[in-house]
Image (cartoon, helix red, strand yellow):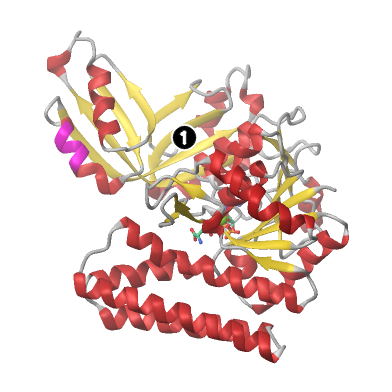
Amino acid sequence: MSLVVMKFGGTSVEDPTAINRTAAIVAGRVAAGKQTVVVVSAMSKVTDQLLRAAAAAAQGDRTGALAISSRLRARHRDTACALIKTPADAAALCNLIEQKFDSLDEILRGLAAILELTPRISDLVVSYGERLSSRIIAAAFTERGTNAAHVDAREIIITDSQFGKAVPLDVLIEKRAAEHLRPLLDQGKVPVMGGFIAANEQNITTTLGRGGSDFTAALLGGALAADAIEIWTDVDGIMTSDPRVCPDALRVKVISFEEAAELAYFGAKVLHPATILPAVRKNIPVLVLNSKNPANEGTRIISIAPHCSSPFKSIAVKKKLSIIDVVASRMLMTHGYLKAIFDIFDKHQCPVDMVSTSEVSVSLTVDSNDKLPLIAADLSQLADVKYEGKKALVCLVGEDIRGQSGMAAQVFSAIKHVNVRMISQGASEINMSFMIDEEDADEAVRSLHAAFFKEPDPVVFDVESRKAVV
Ligand code: ADP
Ligand code: ASP
Ligand code: MG
């Protein structure tokens, strides 16, 4: 029997209507005879609000923090009441919701007393989003006749202790999935779990980083050797650029693992950057689908995508980046200079996105803006340092960039009105990226899109929908 892991993002579970749609989609898969594991995000915007409540509490704004919690309590309670009509089930669920919010309020009061928010407590506070949504959704599935079983993701997704962005421990996850999920699946049940949340080996709550529910689904898909991982979201699939920025973006019908990973890493929020890895390891296709338009075939991410006559598949943008210029005239001709610089980024656990070097100067881009003053202080022991924020990295991805001459000229002529600070081409054969001011980014994407998606290849792009709109 084929097994599918289905992940529903925040907008797919944002209110009773969305949860009903999600329940119908899952029921469809079950009716088609598939073993199904469901992973859900917190209801939309809940994670942001929990983070705001924690920050307010830790700054001493106890009333503000509790007010956010009280609004969230009402939203979850109302959603549960709208979905669950069986009196005993409704009472049990509402009771559970009240208990969870009572314990959340206790943590918020504690934060307001000690005035300090550690990454560990932050993870505990945000975990409430997925812990609540998964309970409500599991109950809604049961109410609609799906044989659902709620599973606390923290029993299965085991990570190290890097709170805020913990690293999963694959061997343990595989073992836990075999012990806890397999028997449920064999009994014909549909396990329903929160994404994003996890625990370390001591049972302390951790999280996989923002947008991490996609990653949870992929980890489970890998652990259970699923036949497919489905990422259900609010757009028709991976598009040729963010449709919010570029309204005439087209759906990409099929894309390779490598291209999708590159797009996710370089800012295409539709997929968490780590999602692809577990799928690649076991060669499991990933589908990106729209819960508001389930009939659409979405995007299929597979190991080898068909040849495409267009050079690029999609354009991603990563904003809120900084550029650091390091100039070390006194290090002219000395070796070990780059190593010394990278050691500093390593010490601060700060990933570098792009690098450009000359004999004595290095420019680097990073997105850990909060760490910059400390990094700059360390670098200034070696060299003169300048840094500047509000930058954006624009990244064009496509396997068919390979071997196409004159591509850089075409790209930069499409955006000749924009000031380009750094360029990277050739480091990866499937991407071409450059750094510009954040305020120019959306316009640059639209110009590039207009230049490169005039005659999209119908094998790869959904050109029919463009025709339908015209
Ligand atoms: P979810 O809550 O379902 O995880 P996200 O908000 O994380 O959804 O991701 C979906 C959003 O990603 C879309 O609404 C869209 O604005 C954005 N996005 C950015 N780049 C792309 C792209 N290339 N294709 C599709 N969506 C994209
Ligand atoms: N709820 C988490 C977030 O908003 C994880 C997710 O939605 O994927 O980041
Ligand atoms: Mg997401």
- Does 355 appear above or below 461? above
Q: Which residues are magenta?
A: 374-378
Taking the spot 69% from the left edge, 76% from the top edge, the residue there is 140
Viewed as shown, does residue 115 lie left or right of 185? Answer: left
Residue at position x 60%, y 72% from top? 135
- Looking at the image, residue 33 lies above or below residue 56: above
- Where is the C terminus found, in terms of image quarters? bottom right
- Relative height, residue 294 to residue 56 (above, below): above
Q: Position of residue 426 (x, y in %)?
A: 51, 20
x and y percentages locating residue 231 in the rendered image: 66, 53
Q: Position of residue 182 (x, y in %)?
A: 71, 52
Q: Is residue 54 visible?
A: yes
- How many numbered callouts? 1
Residue 462 as seen in the image, left or right of residue 403 = right
Tell me the amino acid under the disc marked 1: Lys
Q: Determine if the magenta segment contains residue 141.
A: no
Is residue 232 found left or right of 360 in the rendered image? right
Residue, x 38% and y 47% (percent of image)?
A: 161
Q: Nearer the viewer, residue 218 or 393?
A: 218
**Which residue is pictured at 50% across the width and 85% down the height?**
74
Visible residue check, residue 14: no
Q: Can residue 375 be found in the magenta stretch? A: yes
> Which quadrant contains ligand 1?
bottom right
Q: Please give left or right for residue 267 compared with residue 19 in the image.
A: left
Among the 4 quarters of the image, the one containing residue 418: top left
Residue receiving disc 1: 416
